[in-house]
Amino acid sequence: MSRLAKRFASLARDGRKALNTYIVAGDPVPEATVPAMHALVAGGADLIELGVPFSDPEAEGPTIQAGIERALAHGVTLGDVMDMVSAFRRDDRDTPVVLMGYLNPFLRMGYEDFCTQAVAADVDGVIVVNLPPEEAGTFQEALRSRHMDLVLLVAPTTTAERAAYIAGQGSGFLYYVSYKGVTGARHADAADVAKRLTGIRAVAGGLPVLVGFGIKDGASAAAIAPHADGVVVGSALVDTMGSTPVAGIGNRLKAQVRDIRDALD
Amino acid sequence: MSRSNRVPYEAPTDDGRFGDYGGRFVAETLIHALDELTRLYASVSRDSAFQAALARELKDYVGRPTPLYRADRLTEHAGGARIYLKREDLNHTGAHKINNTVGQAMLASRMGKTRLIAETGAGQHGVATATVAARLGLECRVYMGSEDIARQSINVYRMKLLGAEVAPVNAGSRTLKDAMNEAMRDWVTNVDNTHYIIGSVAGPHPYPMLVRDFQAVIGNEAKEQCLAAEGRLPDLLVACVGGGSNAMGLFYPFVDDDGVDIVGVEAGGEGLGTGRHAAPLNAGTPGVLHGSRTYLMDDESGQIAETHSISAGLDYPGVGPEHAFWKDLGRARYASVTDDEALAAFRVLNQTEGIMPALESSHAVAWTLREAARRPREDIILVNLSGRGDKDIHTVAAIDGIEV
């Protein structure tokens, strides 16, 4: 059983919602990332999404763009990101880590090379923002043969028929984007999400559905969570990474995640 | 030329592939809009009323057909093959870009969209989009890198006069690629009421196909005009390639004419060896950016590289996927010329023919001057003069140390 599947099974057993937390690898400095990952877990995160810096992040709002720019200023590469996951694994064998980014760095490394290194680093899966399932074939096979998950996204504009197709192609969990727009731009509308998620969960075939975009604190997490299997928090954490002196990041992240965790539970 | 034993060119496939290139590498939110656009485009392609209305717009509003002009003094200067110029600079707004924006604005109206957005480098596509928005009474926002805003101030002001909002983009290299990122972000947010007019044969399917088809009027006219003037097809087609829409517009109608050689000219900047250029087909590798798989300039970790060209319209790290396909097929060759060569050609065309080309188009002229000298007088070279150079006067004057 994959680390993601195990984690979702145990959450379901306990009747808890998944809290998935996103930070950008290498933001604001490379040495901050592994301690920040441990802080997220200490605060109550169930999953970590580690952003892979890319020069042209088309779907990100200003906050995450800024985080990516801070990381790129230190020349952080996909290889470096996997080294960070390896370092994290020395102290945490259980928390699933999913890499989230844009296709070109993966393509440039080569899918086979990437998968070999990702397995060695104990990466659990990837989310590639600009890789819809129709384009994912080769990468998906490479991931699947190593038991890594390709997490796919469903948007408010996705038709019901297509949502079923995407659910059939993806693995790990299904990521529902709560609104039309870039990350961190708006609030997730709970009523709207509730309406859409009923249909999506019906076609998800048992795949957990997590909601991201527009969830920034305990209140917004608690409003969305009843309709989903969990939530994703990103921009709010990246904002903390960018506005806190490096030495203080751990404590602030932990407290921030703890607030959301408490609201969810 | 006998073509009996070869299958006619047919690309892209239904899923937008040109061989290994193209496709649809975008966020899920946009898939529905791309599907809708694809379906609408397929239906208007068969709709004679739409096609007739488009032809009327091109004639009465854009001013088509543009002349095919035999440039005798330029020919004499080069000292070899005869050079013809396809005068896209004579279109309304001064470049080929409007062929596409007129067509896409008609599609936007059919979809009931009330707002147009565009990215622009040199500003020609921005002006062409602002123009059709004014003509149709649509709201318009144009994204432009702040570096390009500085070097293309005339076009920025033109867009404002046309009623468009020009949104400066300060991210990354502050040029065309960053403007395109920002336009994609706008589109993802406002997809319900907004149509994104991509200005080149780039982006996710169906854009590379749709923009090519709207621009193919260039090649279709040129073919007829060359046959009328010379009784035969040209030996060689030449056009500059940034994203590659003027080039594909000229080239595409000739794809099955095996006797016609095709050369696209990329921006060699300060020289391919310096790394400061914008020539992905000459010096790049295949990758994925802005919705399609194509040749790109990126570093070994997959970050998109900063590019350089004297011409803002060519200053882009990618290229339309169909050009990538043609490069691999060998149907076209892709050369490059430097900033200095393009500038020299800019001056030569001014002084031999009384025509001021855009710095983009000057790249095609520069390569042609080199090539014409190597060819006999009997050969015909047909060059796409994609735009006029008024917008570049400040850039050239600054190089000459003159304040205008």
Image: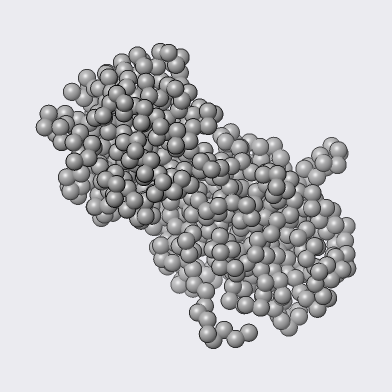
Q: Residue at x 59, y 73 (%)?
A: B255
Q: Residue B247 or B61: which is nearer the viewer?
A: B247
Q: Residue A32 or B19: which is nearer the viewer?
A: A32
Residue B235 in percent (x, y) is at 72, 75
Q: Which quarter of the image is occupied by the C terminus of chain B?
A: top right
Q: Is residue A117 above or below residue B238?
A: above
Q: Is residue B370 above or below residue A48?
A: below
Residue B399 in percent (x, y) is at 82, 41
Q: Quadrant of residue B357?
A: bottom right
- The answer to whether residue A206 shows anywhere in this view is yes
Q: Residue A143 or B124: which is nearer the viewer?
A: A143
Single out the residue that lies furthest toward the left: A13
Residue A36 in percent (x, y) is at 37, 22
Q: Quadrant of residue B336?
A: bottom right
Is A107 left, or right, of B298 in this rendering?
left
- The answer to whether residue B107 shows anywhere in this view is no
Residue A162 in percent (x, y) is at 28, 54
Q: Residue B239 or A118: which is nearer the viewer?
A: A118
Q: Which quarter of the image is occupied by the N terminus of chain B?
A: bottom right
Q: Residue at x 45, y 72 (%)?
A: B46
Is B290 left, or right, of B309 in this rendering?
left
Q: Residue at x 54, y 71 (%)?
A: B52
Q: Is residue B123 above or below residue B9?
A: above
Is B15 left, or right, of A264 in this rendering?
right
Q: Residue at x 61, y 37 (%)?
A: B174
